[in-house]
Every structure is written in C-alpha cells, then in structure tokens.
Image: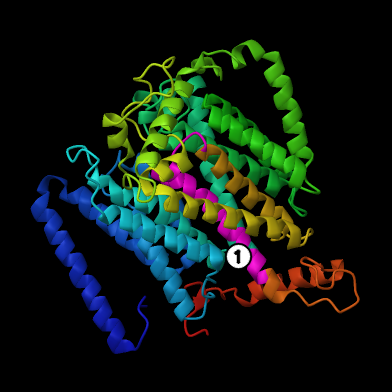
Amino acid sequence: MSLLPGGVRDRSRGEFVIGAVVVVMAAGIAFAAPGQAGLLLAALGVGAAVFALALNNPLIALLLVVLASFGRTAQKEIISAEALTPLFYAMVLALALAVARRAKEMPRLGTVEWLMTTYLVWNIISALLPHPEVDPITEQTAEVYRWIFSGTILPFVVYVVAKSVLDTEKSVRWLLWTTVGMAAYSAWVSIIQFHGPRRLVWPRFIVEAPNWEGRAVGVFNQPVVNGMLLVMGFVVCLFLATRPGTRRGLRWALYALTLPMAYAVYLTHTRSALLSLVVALILGAVLAKGWRRPFVVYLALGAVGVAANASSFFSADRSEGGIGSSNEIYDRLNIMATSLKALAEHPFLGIGIGQFRAYNTYQHVSWSQEIDWNRGRGIISHQNELGIAAELGLPGVLLWISVLLGVLFLLYRALRELPEGTFLGRPLAVLGAIAMVMLVANGATVDLRILDFAGLLCFLYAGMVVGQLERFRDTRPAPRPGTPGAGLPGGMSPADQVAWAEEGRARESRDAVPAGAPIITGRPLGAR
C-alpha cells in the first residue's frame, strides 16, 4: 500500500524516493554521531512509522500534534530532536490528501481566518524588518521562528484543521478522551510531586529541577500551562459524565477524576491557574443548561474551602498556596510600564517580534518610584496583548484582538444556534467558550505566545465548535414563513433538532470503514 496518490508508476517512484531519503538519513546519522547511531536510528524508524500513520488519517495526525505539544519539554529528556514540527507538517499534508480524496471537506475560510492570515503576515514582516533600537548583541533572532510558530502558526492552523477533521461524534470523543488522559497524567505527577514517592514521577525535572520551585509544573515545567490543561480536563470530565447514555460506573469514575484535577490546580500555587478554574466554574454554572449542577456544587465547595483556609489562602506565602504575594505584581507593573514605553516610541511597527526581552533589559523602566526598578527586568512580557503591542505595534495588537473577538463571536453564535439535546450541540459549545475565555484570562498575566500548548489547546476546542456550527447551518431545514423562529438565527423546532442529530449519526455511519479494509484518510481505498 502506498501513501501517494496516482498510478502504479507514480507510487513506485514515490516509494523509491522515500526509501532513498531514509537510506541517506541513516548513513548521515551513522557518520555524524557514531556513538549514538543506534538510538538515533531507532528514533528515525519510529518517527518514520508515526509520520506514515499520521499521513493515513488527519484525525490521528491532529491528535499526534496535540500529544507532541503536550510532551515537547519532556521529550528532551530522551532525545533532543523535536517531534512537534514534523508532525505538524504531517497533519497539514494529511488533511490536504483527505480533501483531495474527498474524504474530508475543504476547511471554510471566513472573516476570522483572513484576520488570522493578516496577523501572521504582520508577524513575518516584523521578523524581516531590521530593528536597530534593540541591542544587536542581545537580539534573539534564533527564537523569532519559535515565537511565530508557537504563537501564531500552530494555534491558527490547528483551529482550521479542527473545523474540518472533528466533524463526527466519534472524532470529537477521541479528542475529549485524549484531553482527559493528558489531564489525568498531569494531575498524577502534580500530586505525587508533593505527596507521593517521587521516583514515580516522570519527567524527572518535575522533582529534580523545576523552573518554579514549590509549584506543580507538570510535564510542561510551567505551572500556568499545567493549570490550563488541568482545568480543561476537569471541564471535559464533567461534560462526558453528564452525557445521556454514559454508564453509571464510567460516570462516577469521571466525577472522581475531577477531584485530583481540581486539587492539582491548587498545587500549581499560581493565581492565573486558580482564576482559570473559577472562570470555568462560573461559565459552566451560567451556560451549561441541563448539566450545570456539578459546576454549582464545585463553586460551593470551593467557597467553603477558601473560607476555612482564608489565612493561608490570602497570605503572601506562595508555597502554601497564598495569593497575596506582591513581588509578582511589581514585576508585571514594571513590565507594563516598559511595554507602554515601547508602544509610545514605536507605535506602528513596534520593537520587533521576539525582541521584548532584549528591550526590557536595556530600556527597562519602573512603574513608579515606590517599586524596585529591578523588578521584572530582563524577562519576556507577562501580558499577551501588551507584549504584542510592544513588539508588533498598534496594527499587530488590533489584528490579534480582532481574531479573539471574531472567534468569541462565533462561539456566542454556536451557543445560541446549536441544539440542546445533541452531543455536538450547545453542550459542546460550552467547552469551546470556556477554552477561549480561559485563554484571554491567562493572557492578562502571561505572554502565552511562547507556550505552544496553551494556544493550541484553546484554539483547537474553538475550531471544533465553529466547525459544528458551520455544518449545522448547512444542514438545518429552513423554517417555513409564519412559523415560530422563521428568519431568526437558531429558529429550529425540537423535531428538526432530532432530525439534524439523526442525520449526523447517519453520516458518521456512512463514513465508517469495513473491518479489514485498507485505510487512507479514514476511508477504504478507491472510495470517493
């Protein structure tokens, strides 16, 4: 079986090229690193097999990208080569092959996608322009690609791919259970870091060299991103537990999983992570019609817990979970002052993508005379929007805010229009809304552009919901004139909602692959 389209001659030629490339790479590894040739060749073989598997199915490719981003920091303990970038290209190619074979629909490009494209182009222009105001010795040109890839290309492309690939209940369930698995593992290592045998923790840097001592850093070695994953896993567990038809044992297992996840959020001892959990609970209590009870219960339990430990919770001791420490606030105030200075000096082009750390080293200012001038000096921005404004100028930050507002508006329409009683309806839209609001809330305290998993996770869930909205608008019957809801968005009777859900299940059944059939992009060979 060949992964390449075309006739026999095309396939054999493509396979010959692939084989030649593998041989050349193997010979190069043996020559360049003879001492590690065995390990590197094994990694090459595994990587080639995974790459081929990803090309076969865009859903698998998407999930592998998510897992590669999840384990990117931990992977460095095994091998220095990074899996995320090649798997990202495999995901794009897999979707292109699936669209060419008509196994998947071409992602629809609307206003939001064009805003994303324009923002990406502005990032690239900023990278190409010279920035003499930044000391050339400290200019971090090697990191510019990572800033653009992690903060722009990866989340935006995943958003578009999710719209096309996560098109059935089965594919959505794969993503949800993948999220539960990642969050459960993250909760495990976070709790064992503090309360268990540390020899069971992997990766080892969690207990041996955490970037933030005394906080649950997770596999990311970063408590903010760890908290975002834990919160998203917590919400997904509640979603799956409250779906009609979920077996009782599985329902209680999911409810039980939410307890260590919520506790692990607390162990991050990070205000933005706690804020994310509170925001998720409030949004769930407000938006989760028909399944808001667990959100309300957790809100009540959280209020009781804070009241019982108020002295520790509001103290300045971060190691004990206190949120009253002022040092980090002083850091952010000085960073804000430096960002505003950069924006005032360079309002149109900014100081250049990825250059804030250098600017903050040599052009650093303090918020006021009462704050130590050294607080926050020489580090990256800790506010998403202010960091973008400083580096990309007013056009850049306005484009970014337009992207956020556009996605949030589409999620609002999904909450209004998608039907209530279906798996892919309004309950799923609640997950997308929580993910994007969590991104905005964390962006107020951390520059998330360099943290690839944070943006990927939130835009992934948003794209999944927006894709459901687009398909729903395409398939819903037009209301007859004079009937309730005619001419209004979301005007759909309960009978029409049931019909729409049944049509979705029938479409998934038609796409199912017979047992034993060779697979390419989720369909039997030759299917059209």
Does 376 appear above or below 382? above
**With respect to residue 111, does 33 lie above or below?**
above
* Front residue of this view, candidates 324 and 102: 324
Residue lying at 75% horizontally and 47% vertically, measured from the top left: 288
Q: Is residue 357 above or below residue 110?
A: above
Coordinates of residue 256 in the picture (x, y in percent): 67, 35
The residue positioned farthest toward the left in the image shown: 31
In the rendered structure, the answer to whether residue 358 lies left or right of residue 102 reads left
Rendered image quadrant of residue 89: bottom left
Magenta segment, which residues? 444-471
Left/right placement of residue 475 relative to residue 480 reads left
Circle 1 SS class = helix
Asked whether, in this view, residue 360 is left or right of residue 453, the answer is left
Q: Main secondary structure of the magenta part?
A: helix
Q: Position of residue 152 (x, y in %)?
A: 42, 54
State the quadrant of the N terminus: bottom left
Residue lying at the far top of the rendered structure: 311
Front-lying residue, 244 or 409: 409
Using the image as rendered, state which of residue 110 and residue 245 is in the foreground: 110
Report which quarter residue 258 is drawn in: top right
Per the image, the residue denoted by label 1 is 467
Q: Position of residue 147 (x, y in %)?
A: 35, 48
Residue at image position (72%, 24%) is 303
Residue 518 visible to an observer of this rendering: no
| 452 inside magenta stretch | yes
Q: Residues within 10 Å of mark 1 (few under 14, many from 20)?
A: many
Colour theme:
rainbow
Q: Residue at x 42, y 30 (%)?
A: 337
